Image (cartoon, helix red, strand yellow):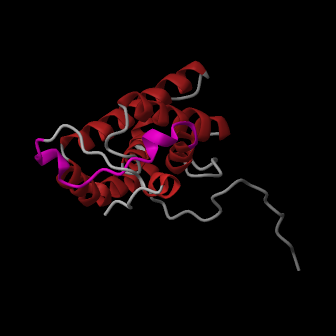
Amino acid sequence: MTSEPLIVSGSPHLHSGAQSSRIMRDVLIALIPAILGATIFFGPRALLVILITVTSCVASEYLIRRLWHRSNNLHDLTAVVTGTLLALNLPVSLPLWMAALGGFIAIVIVKECFGGVGQNFVNPAITARIVLLMSFSSAMSVWNRPFSYLEHSDVVTSASYFEALQSNLPLPS
């Protein structure tokens, strides 16, 4: 009985033949209803947040790979998917510079520092959201009322639930 030599290799061990760019394109197509929903519920600013995070992710990936003398892989669309997923997890009222910082964190710190596509041990978009939440908790904890962009009021404010409990104010309804 002849035994085959043991081959040690990195993942993936099984391959379907599908390329990353095709899979990411399919993911982007699947995200279209969520993007449309965000735009309908929260207005054009949702598209702006998506544009900012995607641009930040793509620019960060391009620049860091160039700085580290790695080949350009923007054609695989992973940075676009990461930026879109990040934007859909952020409050629409988040300052745009924070959204851009989130894209930088997702790509440079989480994705590229651990080797790039398939090598990161956590999801870059969600990890960037967690870092933003821990760094800018007040901006990340805002609840935006759907369709409020259609109203013409400048500001609506009330005591939060915890503020009302601490100061014995009536609870907001």
Q: In which quadrant of the rendered image does the C terminus lie?
A: bottom left
At 60% from the left and 65% from the top, the residue drawn is 14
Q: Position of residue 3 (x, y in %)?
A: 86, 72
Q: Residue furthest front?
A: 168
Q: 68 or 9: nearer the eye?
A: 68
The reply to whether residue 73 is in sight is: no
Q: Residue at x 44, y 32 (%)?
A: 98
Foreground: 117 or 141?
Answer: 141
Q: Position of residue 27 (x, y in %)?
A: 37, 57
Q: Residue furthest top?
A: 67
Instruction: Give the farthest residue toward the bottom.
Output: 1
- Judge from the rendering whether residue 60 lies leftward or rightward of residue 53; answer left or right: right
Which residue is rendered at x = 65% and y = 51% of the image?
121
Q: Position of residue 42 (x, y in %)?
A: 23, 49
Q: Is residue 114 magenta?
A: no
Quadrant hosting residue 45? top left
In the image as oriented, which residue stretches furthest toward the right? Answer: 1
Q: Nearer the viewer, residue 37 or 31?
A: 37
User: Can you give x and y, in whole percent of width and height, for residue 36 in the image?
Assistant: 21, 54
Residue 110 appears in the picture as rendered: yes
The vertical placement of 90 against 104, above or below, is below
Relative vertical location of residue 10 with respect to residue 156 in this rendering, above or below:
below
| Residue extent of the magenta highlight | 134-152
- Residue 145 magenta: yes
Location of the N terminus by quadrant is bottom right
Is residue 148 placed above or below 154 in the rendered structure?
below
How many numbered marks, from 0 up? 0
